[in-house]
Amino acid sequence: MCDVVREVDALDEDASHLRIKVDDDYVRGKFYSLGGGARLVFKRDMLAGAHVFLTPFNPSAFCDRSFRNAVQAAGISKNAGVSGISFVDALDI
């Protein structure tokens, strides 16, 4: 559907609960591990209206609620086994 290219370093690492792996083997020296009950908090002022974006330390795409609601209203979200875009709440990964 789209190719997300906007990258924003907006994760509030102090307010979030996740494993942050730091090692020179990672392309940018750090990796956000989102498994095991991660809870993410983003700095809204750094997003500057970005509805869909990437972080520099994880390949996952993130979006705000208005984007998610628009996708669901358009009927292209994944539900009941139908293909489409699926969403995971960043507060409960």
Image (cartoon, helix red, strand yellow):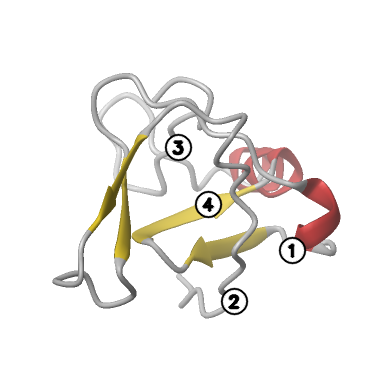
Which residue in the structure is indicated by mark 4? 62
SS at badge 3: loop
Camera-nearest residue between 29 and 10: 29
What distance separates the C-alpha of mark 3 from that of mark 2? Answer: 18 Å
Q: Quadrant of residue 47?
A: bottom right
Label 3 CA crowd tier, 10 Å (few <14, some 14–19, many 20+): few
Name the foreground residue: 64 vs 80.
64
Residue wearing tag 1: 50
Q: Mark 1 and 2 residues: CB-CB less than 8 Å, in contact?
A: yes
Q: Report x, y in % for residue 91.
A: 53, 24
Q: Residues within 10 Å of mark 4 (few under 14, many from 20)?
A: some
Q: What is the number of the mark on residue 20?
A: none
Mark 3 or mark 2, which has the lower sequence index? 2
Q: CA distance from mark 1 to mark 2?
A: 8 Å
In which quarter of the view is residue 57 placed? bottom left
Residue denoted by label 3: 87
Of the numbered discs 3 and 1, the one sitting upstream in the chain is: 1
